[in-house]
Amino acid sequence: MSYKAIYTYAWDLAEGGVGKAADQFLKLGLDTVTMAGSYHAGKFLRPHGRTGKVYFPEDGTVYFHADPARYGAIKPVANGMLKQRDVLRELTDGKRMAVNVWLVLLHNTLLGSAHPESSVANAFGDRYVYNLCPSAPEARAYALGLARDVTESYGVSGISLETPGFLPYVHGYHHEFALNSPNRWLDSLLGLCFCDHCVKGAEKAGIDASRLKAEVARDIGDYLASDVDFTSDMAEAFWHADTLGNQLGQFIRWRSDVVTSLVAEIRAGVRKDVNVAVIPSVARPTGGAWYEGSDLKALGQAAGIIEACFYEPGAARVKADLFDVKRRLGGKGKLRGILRPAYPDLADEAEFLAAVEALIEGGVKELAFYNWGHLRSTNVARIAKAMKLLERHA
């Protein structure tokens, strides 16, 4: 199945008109709309917005009519837009383009706040309510229910799963603030989850997670109590040295098993004819996704498709990232690529087309572009040239 996609939101489609949007997408040479089916909060500048230029979406809601019976204790919250119209249904009923649904799974502050017992907890027990924990049974049931629900209720061709794992400590939470210099070592230790579900699961796998939790809490506490600041190169070296330690290294590998098993459950639980892709991370470069529990090769095997964000400032970096991703996949699973044809990645048209060429020549023939509502019209127009490059290599 071909995948030449544009990422978009229901509110942009509703404002511009689903039919008119499809007309534009088809003229660009695209064949798929990838619409957010579940999403978090944001503050978005919309260059071609008609009713306003800055949009604040409702936090942690879904953009399709969900069936509560398909979920456990954690149930999705319907977006208010659904009281007036179901944009996803309009897309699927229109049958003009394939419809892929982009599901933000475990990054959900609304649901994490309502169910803190299923959210990530650091070594001190502080809950990160923006991240439901993939080890928590109810969080896993919610993620699986979300995937099953949208694929059983709507005639979609596929789903793209984002945030199936452990988010980094620094993730743009509202007014994220500290009066000490951030560094890789500190942020990485603060981002580790030691909730009861993670501790019990890791200990079942033979890891002394209770002891590791105490050690991490001690190290963070000692650092914050000191007058020492790690420079970026020192912090990087210290973090990598710590990950070579037996318990922390095993714990990080175990986190990948947790995420892979969740994705495997989703693949097994949805319609067999539906494509399942995993967006492993928006970390740069993509290889850094391991921290979130994203083992690229394992996820490629579990889902069948890796949809990597090649969000790099220049074609040379895109090409280098592709080289590494292919190396890590080892031939397992299909690889798709997502590009942003604009600032802060590829603001120059020639550089954007060079990045497209690099992906195509590297064997990536399924491409998506992010995000229709955020892009200026001139940047959207560049996608047509990218599609012509793809046609020439067909």
Image (spheres, rainbow, N blue to C red):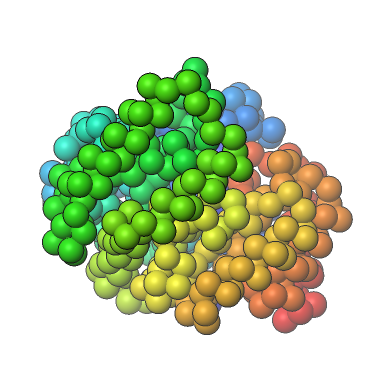
Q: Which of 361/243 is in front?
A: 243
Picture quadrant where residue 155 is located: bottom left
Q: Which of 70/222 is in front?
A: 222
User: How many numbered marks, from 0 up?
Assistant: 0
Residue 182 in the figure: left or right of residue 29: left
Residue drawn at 68 percent across, 34 percent down: 48
Is residue 136 something one can see in this rendering? no
Picture quadrant where residue 151 is located: bottom left
Residue lying farthest right? 350
Residue 261 in the figure: left or right of residue 3: left
Is residue 226 something one can see in this rendering? yes
- Which quadrant: the C terminus? bottom right
Q: Which of 54/208 is in front?
A: 208
Q: State the image coordinates of residue 186 (x, y, percent, origin top left).
A: 44, 36
Q: State the image coordinates of residue 348 (x, y, percent, origin top left).
A: 83, 48
Q: State the image coordinates of residue 117 (x, y, percent, origin top left).
A: 17, 37
Residue drawn at 61 percent across, 68 percent down: 324
The answer to whether residue 171 is above or below residue 284 is: above
The answer to whether residue 37 is above or below residue 79 is: below
Residue 48 in the figure: left or right of residue 154: right
Q: State the image coordinates of residue 273 (x, y, percent, origin top left).
A: 37, 76
Residue drawn at 63 percent across, 26 percent down: 53
Residue lying farthest top? 179
